[in-house]
Amino acid sequence: MRVYGMNTNPRRLLGRRIHLSNSVGQHDLYQSARSKGNLSHSEKKLNWYIIGLVGLVGMLVVSCNEAFSPKAPFEVQPVVYSVLSTDSSKQFVRVYTTYDVQGYEPYDNPADTPVLDASVVITGRRGEWTFRDTLIPRPYEYRYRTPVHVYVTDWRPEPGEAYTLLVTSEQFRETSASITLPARSQSATWSPSAAFLLDFPDTAKHIYDVTATFAVSPSVTAWLPQVVLYYLVETGEDWREQKMEIPVASTPRPGGYSVAAVYCPRAYLSSILNQVHLKYLNTRLRFNRISFRLVQMEASFYTYYNIVRRAQDTLTTRSELPDFTNLSKGYGVFAGCTVDSLVHYYPSDFVKNQ
C-alpha cells in the first residue's frame, strides 16, 4: 500500500472497476464518468502503474532476445609500474599493455606484452633522466619463461624532491604521473650498547634487543621497518656479497607516529647469524655489515600497496578486485620511497666469521 501512497487496497480497487464495467446499468455510468475525466485519483494512479508495468514487461521480453556477454569491448591500454627508491643507484620502469583472451580466464594469455618502442623520461627540479630498455632475469617462470623487459637508468633520486614520469608510445600515445618523495628522517640514533650487542650477540645476554630510532618525516603517509644483513661468501678466487632481510617489528614511540623504533631482539639476531654460519659451514664466510632501515612511503605507494594487500581475502571467494592508479591513462602506479638507515660494520675478527 505504501507503494501507491494511499490506504486503498489496489486489489479491491481493481475489483471494483471490473464489477462496474460488467454490471448492467452501471457500465454506461462508468464510461460516462471516465469520458468526463471524473475518475477518482486512486483509479487514475493505478492506470499509470498498469501502463508502466506492461511497458516494463515488454522491454524485458525484447531484451531477452539479445545476446549477453560479460566481456566489455577491448581497448589497448598502457600498464606502467615504477617505484623510485633513494637507496638505489638504478631506477626501473616497466611498460606493458593490456591484453585480450579468447575466453574469460586471464591466465590463458600465452605471452607477456611488453612495449618495446616506448620513450621513458623522468623530470625533476635538478634535471631530466632518459631510460633505456634492457632485459633482466625473471625470478619466477611458472607462467612466462621469457626475460623481463624493463627500462632502466643510472640515477639516484633525492629525498623531498618532486618527479614526473612521462611514457610515450605509438600504441597508446602517452601517459604520465607525478609524485613527491618524503623528506629524510630528522634524526636517527642507536639504542645504548647497540654496538656491543651487535659485535657480541652471544655474550651480551643482559641486553634484550638493539633498537634504531628514526624521527619520521611529517610528509610520510606510511613507513616500513627493515633489517638487512650483508655478508661475503668465497666462491673460487672471488668473494660474492649476499644479503638477507631479517623480519623485524616496529612500533611508534610515545611521541606518536612521528618517531619510529626499529628493533631486533638479541636472541633472534643471534639465531639468524648462526643459521648463516651453518649454511656456509664448509665455505669461508665474512660478515660485513647490518643495516637498520626505515622505508618511508609517499601517498601513491601506500595507497596502491594497501588496496592490493587488503584485496587478498583468503577467507571468502571474491569476484572483484579493487584497483588504483595515479597514471593519466591506463593502469599501474608511479610511486616512490625514501630510505633512511643506520649501518653497523662488523669487525674483521667477528666471532661468526670463518
Image: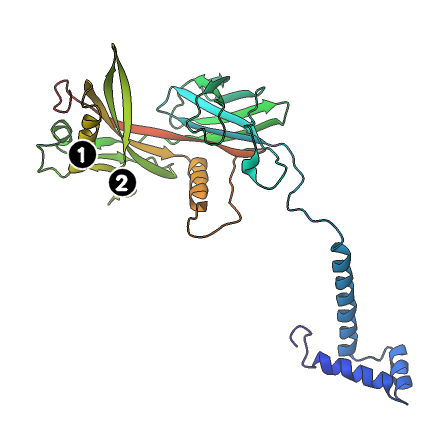
Residue at image coords 63%, 32%: 76
**Can the viewer see residue 289?**
yes
Residue corresponding to mark 1: 271
The answer to whether residue 187 is left or right of residue 300 is left
Coloring applied to the structure? rainbow
Above/below status of 138 relative to 217: above
The answer to whether residue 224 is left or right of residue 74 is left
Q: How many marks?
A: 2
- Outermost residue toward the bottom? 25
Above/below status of 37 relative to 206: below
**Can the viewer see residue 186?**
no
Residue corresponding to mark 2: 250
Q: Quadrant of the C terminus?
A: top left
Q: Foreground residue, 56 or 296?
A: 56
- Give coordinates of residue 26: x percent, y percent: 88, 88
Residue at image coords 28%, 16%: 240
Q: Amino acid at mark 2?
A: Ser
The answer to whether residue 190 is left or right of residue 99 is left
Q: Quadrant of the N terminus?
A: bottom right
Classify residue 29 by image quadrant. bottom right
Instruction: Single out the mark in the foreground, 2 or 1.
Output: 1
- Give coordinates of residue 179: x percent, y percent: 47, 31
Label 2 Cα neighbours within 10 Å, binned few <14 / some 14-19 / many ≥20:
some
Q: CA distance from mark 2 to mark 1?
A: 19 Å
Secondary structure beneath disc 1?
helix
Secondary structure beneath disc 2?
strand
Q: Upstream in the sequence, badge 2 or badge 1?
A: 2
Q: Amino acid at mark 1?
A: Ser
Q: Foreground residue, 243 or 122?
A: 243
